[in-house]
């Protein structure tokens, strides 16, 4: 079988047709095996949720992938396979990332004359952003119902979903839709679409650089912090990330204005995390307490000798023996099965602000599926604040401390090493932090540039008497 024929078959398998695009092919077979093995090794040694993995399947998959990675035709195909292997771990803080040079060749929304942004609305791939001069041809709210002749969800489940790492199913579904058309430059798609009025039409597009960058509705450039006034002395404060500590000084600049508010909205819907300490330095102003409760954390503790002893230790060896021997034998058994952990000392965040500096007013915290990591730590610390109410959709449900390491060809990988829970042990990774008042993402919001979650929060606060 010729190389050209093999390549053609691979393209049919992935459901797309590629133009002549120069995808780099720099990795040797040895590089590919090493990268796969490096990831497999780091997961076995460091992954905090290894106890939830079917180890027999995990190891068998690894053996199968040794051959598969060697058969890949270019660096992109190789990294796609690594992502598929990684996705089986179902963790949002464990992931494979392409090199910078390779990322430049992968397009998602750009099709020359067409910019197409997709959002998961009620399980459908809905157009929520389009090139401005195409908004009549493809109105906001148009649904992609088929991709290359295959029903959209069937196509996504087969060619997109298996390559996405996520801790929660709803985030996985969202990414599956938003990345539905993600592929190398030159990839051709034959789309079948349905307009909001029910009209069905076909569109052929090819991934290439945009010829017109005017997007409808205009893309909102989110600031790190946004403050504005709403009706009835309700202040709106958007905290859009905790990675840059500059947000603390920005917050302190707005603090005199916030003190004038009778009610407050804190918007965390676009906050995908960063440093938990940054969030706590802001949250401390909105509580009467002297401490902020934090999540409890643990990581795997690996002492090779205990794992070796575990091979010769039986469950019966943990009973009718001295306490010292019992603990040693338990540790040996747990170590053998990668279930021995180190629990970090619990140190709540100590607040040194005076009571006069606090702002205790009815507060709505807006959350959504993109609220993640350090922003979820913020929510955990705010959980016992009776004057605070969470409104929106469930949070991302993924946090932890990843170990980051290089892969061949300039890519990187992350493996989550730390488990976090509520102070009482309640789990939120994999399920998300739930809102007190749930809202839904609707097509009407996008068609009318409406923020229904914000409106519900305003209605809720206006009903509260000071």
Image: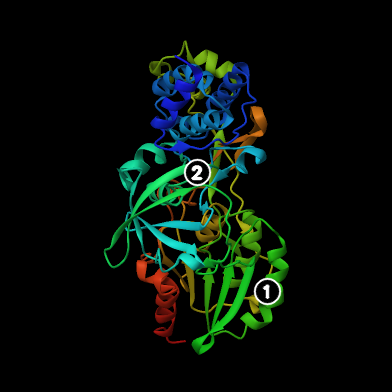
Q: Residues within 10 Å of mark 1 (few under 14, many from 20)?
A: few
Q: Which numbered disc flags the more N-terminal residue, 1 or 2?
A: 2
Residue 240 on image: x %, y %: 59, 63
Of residues 358 and 53, the one drawn nearer to the viewer in this rendering:
53
Of residues 209 and 331, the one drawn nearer to the viewer in this rendering:
209
Numbered badge on residue 354: 1
Task: Specify whether residue 412 is in view.
Answer: yes
Residue drawn at point x = 68 percent, y = 65 percent: 247
Of residues 351 and 383, the one drawn nearer to the viewer in this rendering:
383
Q: How many numbered circles are shown?
A: 2
Q: Secondary structure at mark 2?
A: loop
Numbered badge on residue 92: 2
Q: Which residue is outermost to the bottom?
A: 232
Residue drawn at point x = 34 percent, y = 42 percent: 155
Residue 427 on image: x %, y %: 43, 47
Residue 111 on image: x %, y %: 51, 52
Q: Secondary structure at mark 1?
A: loop
Q: Quadrant of residue 463?
A: bottom left
């Amino acid at each position: 079988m010729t190389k050209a024929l093999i390549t053609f078959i691979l393209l049919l398998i992935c459901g797309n047709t590629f133009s002549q695009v120069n995808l780099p092919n720099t990795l040797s077979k040895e590089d590919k095996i090493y990268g796969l093995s490096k990831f497999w090794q780091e997961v076995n040694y460091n992954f905090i949720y290894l106890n939830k993995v079917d180890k027999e399947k995990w190891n068998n998959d690894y053996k199968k992938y040794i051959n598969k990675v060697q058969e890949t035709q270019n660096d992109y195909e190789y990294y796609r396979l690594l992502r598929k292997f990684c996705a089986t771990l179902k963790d949002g803080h464990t992931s494979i990332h392409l090199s910078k040079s390779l990322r430049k060749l992968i397009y998602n929304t750009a099709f020359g004359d067409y910019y197409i942004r997709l959002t998961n609305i009620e399980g459908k791939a809905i157009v929520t952003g389009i090139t401005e001069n195409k908004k009549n041809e493809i109105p906001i709210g148009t649904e992609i119902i088929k991709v290359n002749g295959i029903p959209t969800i069937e196509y996504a489940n087969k060619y997109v979903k298996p390559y996405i790492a996520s801790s929660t199913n709803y985030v996985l579904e969202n990414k599956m839709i938003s990345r539905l058309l993600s592929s190398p430059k030159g990839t051709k798609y034959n789309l079948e679409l349905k307009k909001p009025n029910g009209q069905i039409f076909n569109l052929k597009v090819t991934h290439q650089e945009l010829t017109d960058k005017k997007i409808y509705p205009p893309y909102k450039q989110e600031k790190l912090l946004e403050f504005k006034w709403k009706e009835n002395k309700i202040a709106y404060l958007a905290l859009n990330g905790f990675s840059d500590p500059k947000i603390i000084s920005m917050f302190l600049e707005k603090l005199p204005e916030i003190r004038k508010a009778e009610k407050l909205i804190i918007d965390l819907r676009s906050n995908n995390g960063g440093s938990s300490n940054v969030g706590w330095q802001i949250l401390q102003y909105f509580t009467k307490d002297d401490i902020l409760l934090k999540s409890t954390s643990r990581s795997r503790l690996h002492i090779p000798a205990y794992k070796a002893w575990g091979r010769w230790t039986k469950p019966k060896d943990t009973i009718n023996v001295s306490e010292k021997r019992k603990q040693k034998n338990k540790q040996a058994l747990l170590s053998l099965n990668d279930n021995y952990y180190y629990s970090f000392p619990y140190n709540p965040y100590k607040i040194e602000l005076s009571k006069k500096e606090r702002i205790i007013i009815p507060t709505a915290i807006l959350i959504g599926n993109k609220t993640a990591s350090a922003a979820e730590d913020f929510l955990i610390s705010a959980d016992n604040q009776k004057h605070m109410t969470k409104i929106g959709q469930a949070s991302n449900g993924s946090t932890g401390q990843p170990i980051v390491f290089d892969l061949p060809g300039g890519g990187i990988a992350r493996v989550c090493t730390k488990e976090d829970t509520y102070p009482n042990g309640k789990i939120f990774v994999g399920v998300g932090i739930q809102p007190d008042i749930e809202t839904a993402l609707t097509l009407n919001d996008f068609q009318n540039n409406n923020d229904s979650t914000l409106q519900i929060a305003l209605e809720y606060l206006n009903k509260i008497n000071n």
